Image (tube, helix red, strand yellow):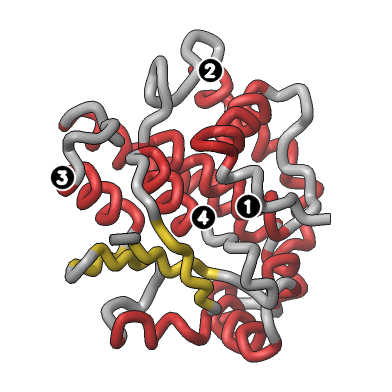
Amino acid sequence: MTILLYDLVGRDASRPFSPHCWKAAMALAHKGLDFESVPTPFTAVPGVEDGVSKIVPVIRDGDKTVSDSFAIALYLEDAYSDRPTLFGGEGGKAMARFIERWSQLTIHSYLGSAALMDIHDVLAPEDQAYFRKSREARYGKRLEEVPAGREAGLATFRTSLEPLRSMLSYQPWIGGTSPLFADYIVFGAFQWVRITSPFPVLAEDDPVADWFGRCLDLHGGIGRKIPAAA
């Protein structure tokens, strides 16, 4: 039975953009599982699977529903243990937790503010209203003011990626010799901005950009099938 992945979208239902949904999509593809993306705008999330979660991603696998990208990865690892591993053992799960926190605090904090208006602009009107209200409450200012310093902060953001850049100088993936869920965590953040915003967050000659390009090509190019923002 095909697994359903409830996937966050804007006006264009063919362009899922959530970093967390992309983690789940890459995890499903890594396991070689057939899945169907169910386009889900912000205002439709409360109705997903009778309100099972306030957030997406959510997957339905037969009679099982799971929400939260990390919980989905753990579920897939246990339920499909005969397929390629997402973690490589308990140590890999612990490592992925660290990567998740680092990504949220270092990468998401800059990218989320830098691309905020671009994300708003890809949404349908009813979702724009929700997005504006929720994000202005979060940031404590008008939506338009949040990305104002993104150019000034870009060099500092790129410098903050040095741990990842340095690691890639001696191994091709965060997971080591092959990608693991830890790679998909960081990939999801950059895919989020690639799909929603034309703002160039990575220099073309950055080893992180090379790694990201290789991630886009994984699993039959599932990530690259969605064109970058114009």
Q: Earlier in the sequence, mark 3 or mark 2?
A: 3
Vertical order, 159 against 116 (above or below): above
**Mark 2 and mark 4 residues within 8 Å of each other at the beta carbon:** no
Q: Where the N terminus falls, by quadrant?
A: bottom left
Residue 168 spot, x, y in % from top left: 53, 17
Q: What residue type is labelled 3?
A: Asp
Mark whose residue sits in front, 3 or 2: 3
Q: Where is residue 93 in the image (x, y as percent from the top left)?
A: 23, 36
Mark nearest the camera among 1 and 4 is 4
Q: Name the residue under label 3.
A: 78
The label shown at residue 111 is 1
Reading the image, the residue beneath label 2 is 168
Residue 181 versus residue 22 in the image, above or below: above
Q: Nearer the viewer, residue 83 or 69?
A: 83
Three-letter amino acid code at the position of disc 1: Leu
- x, y percentage for residue 60? 29, 67
- For label 2, the crowd category at 10 Å Cα-Cα, with few meaning under 14, some 14 to 19 and many 20 or more, is some
Secondary structure, mark 4, is helix
Q: Name the residue under label 4.
A: 19
Element type where label 3 sits in the image = helix
User: Which of disc 4 and disc 2 is earlier in sequence?
Assistant: 4
Relative horizontal placement of residue 212, taking residue 76 as reference (left or right) = right
- Left or right of 99 in this view: 127: right
Q: Which residue is drawn at 35% across and 67% down?
A: 58
130 is higher (above) or lower (below) than 59: below
The C terminus lies in which quarter of the figure? Answer: bottom right
Q: Which residue is drawn at the image coordinates 75% and 74% (left, top)?
A: 121
